[in-house]
């Protein structure tokens, strides 16, 4: 697969806590230059980024990030605010405690509310696979499919691990046909990217691939 095609599937990401506006602008400029799918940045920067990019790049942001344990009302407010500020895509983190407590109906209720407030914007559901059992991952494939989310996403990049090939293969086997897959965290090379795409991912959350194209250190998300 050509590099340009891979880059077109990338959510070019900067979510570190100490990200400055100058760093965010560089990420936006690079996303536009190389033609990524979106730029994924903290909610506090959505309005500035939307105005800075001026429709040249889709704006993605994160909700309940990175721990996921905000209440349903808080997450829905965050979504409304992000969309009002110009976000096109929403990456929300599930309440992992609810999943560990087998409160599946509550998770579904939360995500249905978030789906409603997203309207026609893209909703990606982060389930933080590194913290889950295989059965929990399968159950989340079912729930994400039932609520009509656009993507299931592996990871925040802020926990104990990122995307794995095994998890992408599991997603591909258990999600509904209309749900897409986002692999995020730990994608360190174009060979990694090709592997994840071949297994079923159609979106990649990473900053490293653009850095490689710029001949910079490939560290980071």
Image: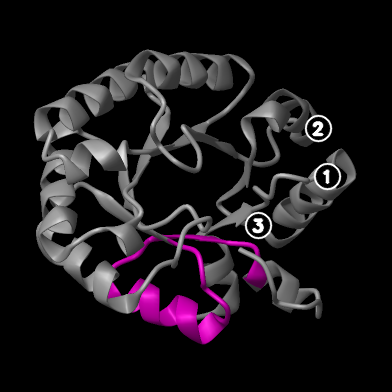
User: Which residue is drawn at the image coordinates 33% and 19% (left, top)?
Assistant: 72
Mark 1: secondary structure: helix
Instruction: Give the distance between the C-alpha atoms of the residues marked 3 and 2, in whole angstroms.
Output: 16 Å
The image quadrant of residue 53 is top right
Mark 2 crowd level (few <14, some 14–19, many ≥20, 10 Å Cα): some
Mark 3: secondary structure: loop
Q: Nearer the viewer, residue 184 or 72?
A: 72
Measured as percent of width and height from the top left, residue 121 is found at 42, 28
Rendered image: mark on residue 73? none
Tell me the magenta residue range: 184-208
Q: Nearer the viewer, mark 3 or mark 2?
A: 2
Measured as percent of width and height from the top left, residue 186 is found at 51, 71
Q: Are marks 2 and 1 in contact (CB under 8 Å)?
A: yes
Q: Which residue is mark 1?
A: 25
Q: Nearer the viewer, residue 84 or 105?
A: 105
Rendered image: mark on residue 52? 2
Q: Nearer the viewer, mark 3 or mark 1?
A: 1
């Amino acid at each position: 697969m050509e590099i340009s095609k891979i880059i077109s599937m990338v959510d070019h990401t900067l979510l570190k806590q100490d990200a400055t506006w100058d760093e965010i602008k560089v990420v936006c400029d690079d996303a536009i230059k190389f033609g990524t799918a979106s730029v994924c940045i903290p909610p506090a920067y959505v309005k500035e980024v939307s105005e800075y990019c001026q429709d040249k790049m889709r704006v993605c942001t994160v909700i309940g990030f990175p721990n996921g344990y905000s209440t349903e009302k808080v997450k829905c407010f965050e979504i409304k605010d992000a969309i009002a500020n110009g976000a096109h895509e929403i990456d929300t983190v599930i309440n992992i405690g609810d999943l560990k407590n087998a409160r599946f109906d509550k998770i579904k209720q939360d995500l249905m509310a978030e789906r409603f407030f997203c309207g026609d914007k893209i909703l990606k559901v982060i389930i933080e696979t590194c913290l889950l059992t295989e059965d929990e991952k399968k159950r989340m494939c079912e729930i994400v499919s039932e609520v009509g989310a656009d993507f299931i996403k592996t990871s925040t990049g802020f926990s104990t691990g990122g995307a794995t090939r095994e998890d992408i293969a599991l997603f591909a086997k258990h999600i509904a046909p209309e749900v897409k897959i986002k692999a995020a965290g730990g994608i360190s090379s174009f060979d990694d990217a090709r592997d994840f795409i071949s297994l079923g991912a159609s979106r990649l959350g990473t900053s490293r691939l653009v850095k490689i194209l710029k001949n910079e250190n490939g560290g980071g998300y």
